[in-house]
Image (cartoon, helix red, strand yellow):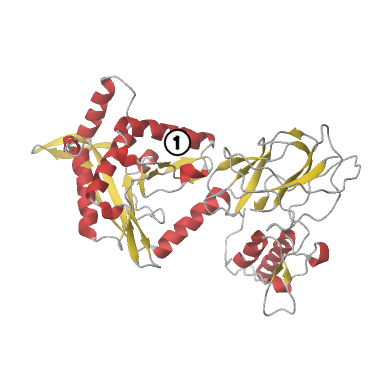
Amino acid sequence: MAQVLEFKLPDLGEGLTEAEIVRWLVAVGDVVAVDQPVVEVETAKAMVEVPCPYGGVVTARYGEEGTELPVGAPLLTVAVGASEPAPEAESAPAPAADGGPGETSGNVLVGYGTGAPAARRRRVRPATAVVTAPVEAPVAVAEAVPDRAGPVPVISPLVRRLARQNGLDLRALDGSGRDGLILRCDVELAIERMERAVQAPAAHAPTTAPAATGAVTERVPLRGVRGAVADKLSRSRREIPEATCWVDADATELMAARTAANAAGGPKISLIALLARICTAALARFPELNSTVDMDAREIVRLRDVHLGFAAQTERGLVVPVVRDAQDRSAESLSAEFARLTEAGRTGTLTPGDLTGGTFTLNNYGVFGVDGSTPIINHPEAAMLGIGRIVAKPWVHDGELAIRQVVQLSLTFDHRVCDGGTAGGFLRYVADCVEQPAVLLRTL
């Protein structure tokens, strides 16, 4: 007899607590093999295909495409031991997202494999059709609220967060779920009512009165990559006392050196790779900028290895892939790794590991046709080097006015880790290497 086992959204690592269902890769009634990808989800870090630890027949799916689920929430159920489409699992409440007796799923990551699950039996009944199960599993987990006579029945941390972000008191809501469970739709409806109540007085105001706000054309949820960027940048501005210094540099010799290197044969070297190599040499001289700040311990933590992030604009928004151990790579190796990560970003195949662990960021905003910028530091790093466009400009060279290839370099740094002298020294060394690439040879 087939056993119906439940597979929950696993811990995808890197502190991620939820994911959005982008695309189901299986349908109810499909036969799946152990470790076969069953759903594609988008986290705050990357798109991930999630493999199922069980082999059998899919009997139910939980959540429509576009739905956000917390880690630990049910994804699907599989009839293990069935060789053909199995009857639908008995309609019963799904277990709470935090697990409980009989939980069988562990942390399943792409490429990590799975362990043998502990079997759990369920009764099954014949069915002619199977529909997608609701996202909000109707089992309440009590959220203790001291001011209410009794607990607030909420299961999803997403529901609690949504209410908190909109200033909504969950104690005032009556849930539409089983046993009064407060669902996401209840919170969204309450928020909509609040907005209508605020807008109602404006609708009856005299036509001569100026509008308090412009007409709303769209409300875009801050979630996935966009939400992660918003959270990180807000935290950076809130916590890091940053400062920026900049300098114009004559990049003519660097451009000529790159042309000569590529003409000599072998793999082509990108300009960003040369600038990255200059960065790692500068960080070896000024290690204060390859660090992070631990305010709890009141310590500056200097890091040995340079994991170099670079800002990249993709269809999913701004991402920062990381080149590991950049200090040990040649310009040729850096160029190959930049190319690999850029292509992965373009195709949406960057993994969470590709997007985390950076210690210093290189931001080439020159690709947007701009000269300068004051970028926000990629928290919890301590600095970011910005590169503007390289453009022909009048420049005094060897005592004479000439047309040279000029670039503006900017350094935004955490003023807690160093003062202006260190930041200025770093930036001046980078500029010297750009202007005279032979300077870099001293450190090779």
Is residue 296 positioned above or below 51 on the image? below
Residue sitting nearer the eye, 251 or 224: 224
Residue drawn 52% across the image and 41% down it: 351
| Disc 1: CA contacts within 10 A as few (<14), some (14-19) or many (>=20) | many
Q: Secondary structure at mark 1?
A: helix
**How far across and down, in percent of the image, does residue 243 sit?**
30, 59
Residue drawn 28% across the image and 38% down it: 277
Q: Is residue 3 left or right of residue 273?
A: right
**Where, quadrant-wise, is the N terminus in this rendering?**
top right
Q: Is residue 221 left or right of residue 125?
A: left
Residue drawn 29% across the image and 60% down it: 417
Residue 257 appears in the figure? yes
Residue type for callout 1: Leu
**How far across and down, in percent of the image, does residue 280 sit?**
28, 43
Residue sitting nearer the eye, 2 or 143: 2
Residue at the extreme left = 399
**How far across and down, in percent of the image, does residue 51 sit?**
65, 39
Number of numbered labels in the structure image:
1
**Where, quadrant-wise, is the C terminus in this rendering?**
top left
Residue designated by label 1: 341
Residue 372 appears in the figure? no
Q: Quadrant of residue 132?
A: top right
**How far across and down, in percent of the image, does residue 296 sit?**
40, 68
Q: Is residue 438 left or right of residue 265?
A: left
